[in-house]
Image: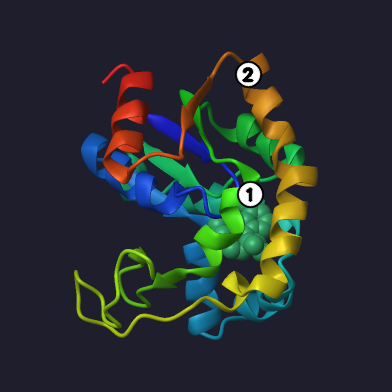
Amino acid sequence: MKLIFLGPPGAGKGTQAERIAERFEIAHLSTGDMLRAEIRNATPLGAAAKAYIDRGELVPDSVIIDMVRERITREDCKKGFLLDGFPRTVVQAEALQSFTDVDFAVNIDVPSERLVKRISGRRMCPDCGAAYHVSMYAETTCQKCGAVLYQRDDDREETVYNRLKVYTEKTAPLIAYYEAEEKLITVNGDQAVDAVTESILKGLGA
Ligand code: AMP
């Protein structure tokens, strides 16, 4: 099973991707998490990516395409993978198609007026990547692993508007791209987390 998750920032892609990847026992590959790990490890790639991420811009296609092309050849992708946050441009989608086929593209749809609140209230675990929202979880440490939660720099309101603009201009066209490929499954992401998971599984015929 090879899946792609589409959707604007704050749609709940990461949360749903983790659940669906676990269910199908496939690798969950978040390009955002991969880039943040590069930054934490102070690699040259991380240093190059940081300026783009901090501004809410996309990292250049060539960098991200090479990263994904290599990543999906690893052992943990033998049974399949779920790409969370890639592709984000038509160029990336075409590159992906040139080196592998995907079964479905899941589009998590959330009304744009909901997104800013969802993103700016998000708190992340630096160790296991779990995401929480301040309106539903008042603790300051991760429920799963106990690490102290933090707010991503690019989740602050100043950057969020640019990320949404970039999504509309560069990533939203992928909805039509995968629809034309007859691979698109759109689910309503503006429901309880469990209900969204159920909708995705139903869409996948599972
Ligand atoms: P995410 O965690 O998916 O919200 O990604 C955080 C940031 O990483 C994005 O705002 C981009 O700057 C960068 N990024 C992640 N995935 C990609 C991608 N496929 N193409 C370009 N930039 C990306």
Give residue 193's position: percent from left, percent from top: 32, 45
- Residue at 35% x, 74% y is 125
Establish if 63 lies above or below 149.
above
Judging from the image, the colouring scheme is rainbow
Q: Amino acid at mark 2?
A: Glu
Q: CA distance from mark 1 to mark 2?
A: 24 Å
Which residue does the numbered mark 1 point to in the structure image? 113
**Residue closest to the eye, 15 or 102:** 15
Q: Secondary structure at mark 1?
A: helix
**Residue closest to the eye, 21 or 48:** 21
Which residue does the numbered mark 2 point to in the structure image? 179
**Residue closest to the eye, 185 or 118:** 118
Give residue 100's position: percent from left, percent from top: 54, 31
Establish if 28 lies above or below 23.
below
Ligand 1 lies in which image quarter?
bottom right
Q: Amino acid at mark 1?
A: Glu
Mark 1 or 2: the one toward you: 1
Q: Is residue 58 visible?
A: no
- Residue at 35% x, 65% y is 132
